[in-house]
């Protein structure tokens, strides 16, 4: 029968949609969602009746969905007390992140993650010497340089200007974190009216992302985004930051490791793709854009999330806040048209990248704005993980490689002939 032919990759017959759903413990509709997100590859069954799936790929996805924690070098699970993602909810130290975002600003939540204490009204300011070094280094880059490259250079320059960077005492690391977040923000070129150096991070970052004058609702959206993006469990950039911290790297190096891992289309760059898609949807309509992406075999940016089978709680909060901003209405309608169009095929919800795209497009920000907000915000999370890792056995995250090369002894390679 069509659905029972053998899979040439694994040797086991391919699975029907129903069988794949049973192995994954989900509904068949969710299997189609996995295909749309690029997490599963489907193949049309012989005769065109239904889809089939590679059983090895299905089993690998099932293992990932169980979210077995990453391991340290000795195979022990990598524990963390910072973020929990469970049943489509997002918690910082056991407290719902959306509730924290409603009641506290970015600096307050970051400080609480680092120290366990809440300091109402706390502000982060940059040390003059580190800020001057960061501005000089970032200012020397070519005029076309993007915001993320400026952040990476600013972090390295700030490290070189801080003689205390190797002091890993908690109080020093926390002081460094405050300084670094302020430095990264203030080192970016100003587009709008300059804000005081002790203004909230959201206010100062706004002027680096757009020349539009902000009102209270816009700043509330940006500050809420900063809170909700502080941490998201053991994301790729966070694992990179923790590996650096396990070698006792100083906080600037930890953040540089996180920024390096962030620089990819599947992590930090995802919001930029959503931004570009949303601009296209405003011009041609959401349905036309979805059709174009599907025809080209591309997933639609800003939809679905591997850790949330249903709604991304961060996107829900930001979209609700954006409803109160009149200038965001067109982009919000276009985003929801994209979601509604996809819902005719698979039940995918907006993720935080789409919410960031609504913010950046509506406020006249560049395509890189969402990733920049992500990077500034996540710096606080990387520092929180570094503080945890500094308390662990050093170099515990040193795995042993599984060598797959030719067995020794091998002959010396022959040199290339001279021409």
Image (cartoon, rainbow, N blue to C red):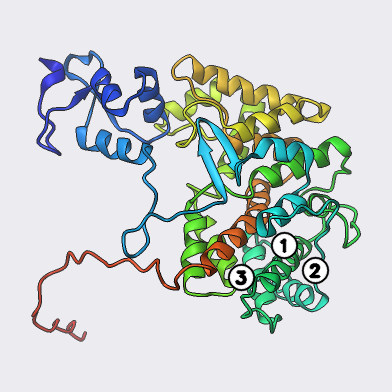
Position of residue 178 measured from the top left corner of the image (x, y, whole percent):
74, 64
Question: Is 327 left, or right, of 415 in this rendering?
Answer: right
* Mark 3 → mark 1, Cα distance in angstroms: 11 Å
| Quadrant of res 350 | top right
Mark 3 vs 1: CB contact within 8 A? no
> What numbered label is drawn on residue 411?
none
Residue 24 in view: yes
At label 1, counting other C-alpha atoms closer than 10 Å, the crowd grade (few under 14, some 14-19, many 20 or more) is many
Residue at x 27%, y 22% (from the top left corner): 22
* Mark 2 → mark 3, Cα distance in angstroms: 15 Å
Q: Earlier in the sequence, mark 3 or mark 1?
A: 1
Residue at x 89%, y 39% (from the top left corner): 215
Q: Which residue does the numbered mark 3 point to in the structure image?
A: 251
Residue at x 50%, y 59% (from the top left corner): 261
| Quadrant of res 75 | bottom left
Viewer-nearest residue: 221 or 191: 221
Position of residue 94 measured from the top left corner of the image (x, y, whole percent):
60, 42
Above or below for 43 versus 238: above
Position of residue 73 measured from the top left corner of the image (x, y, whole percent):
34, 65
Above or below for 142 versus 296: below
Above or below for 322 versus 408: above
């Amino acid at each position: 029968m069509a659905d029972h032919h053998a899979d040439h990759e694994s040797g086991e017959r391919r699975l029907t949609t129903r069988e794949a759903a049973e192995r994954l413990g989900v509904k068949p509709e969710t299997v189609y969602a996995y295909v749309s997100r690029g997490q599963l590859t489907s193949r049309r069954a012989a005769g065109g009746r239904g889809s089939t799936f590679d059983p090895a790929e299905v089993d690998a996805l099932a293992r990932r969905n169980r979210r077995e924690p990453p391991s340290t070098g000795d195979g022990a699970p990598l524990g963390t007390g910072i973020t929990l993602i469970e049943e489509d909810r997002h918690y910082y130290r056991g407290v719902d992140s959306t509730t924290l975002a409603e009641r506290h600003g970015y600096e307050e939540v970051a400080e609480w993650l680092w120290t366990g204490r809440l300091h109402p009204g706390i502000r982060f300011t940059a040390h003059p010497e580190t800020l001057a070094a960061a501005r000089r280094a970032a200012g020397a880059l070519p005029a076309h340089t993007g915001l993320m490259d400026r952040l990476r250079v600013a972090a390295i320059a700030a490290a070189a200007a801080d003689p205390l960077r190797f002091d890993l005492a908690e109080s020093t690391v926390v002081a460094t974190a405050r300084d670094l977040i302020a430095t990264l923000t203030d080192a970016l070129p100003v587009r709008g009216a300059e804000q005081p150096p002790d203004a909230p991070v959201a206010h100062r970052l706004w002027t680096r992302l757009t020349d539009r004058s902000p009102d209270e609702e816009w700043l509330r959206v940006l500050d809420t985004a900063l809170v909700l993006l502080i941490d998201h469990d053991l994301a790729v950039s966070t694992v990179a930051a923790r590996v650096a911290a396990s070698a006792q790297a100083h906080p600037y190096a930890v953040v540089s490791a996180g920024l390096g891992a962030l620089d990819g289309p599947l992590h930090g760059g995802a919001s930029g793709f959503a931004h570009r898609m949303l601009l296209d949807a405003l011009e041609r309509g959401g349905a036309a854009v979805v059709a174009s992406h599907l025809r080209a075999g591309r997933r639609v940016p800003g939809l679905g999330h591997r850790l949330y089978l249903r709604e991304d709680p961060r996107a829900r909060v930001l979209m609700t806040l954006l409803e109160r901003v009149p200038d965001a209405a067109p982009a919000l309608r276009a985003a929801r048209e994209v979601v509604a169009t996809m819902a005719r095929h698979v039940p995918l919800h907006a993720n935080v990248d789409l919410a960031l795209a609504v913010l950046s497009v509506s406020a006249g920000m560049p395509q890189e704005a969402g990733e920049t907000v992500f990077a500034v915000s996540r710096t606080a999370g990387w520092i929180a993980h570094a503080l945890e890792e500094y308390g662990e056995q050093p170099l515990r995250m040193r795995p042993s490689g599984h060598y797959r090369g030719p067995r020794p002894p091998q002959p010396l390679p022959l040199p290339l002939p001279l021409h």
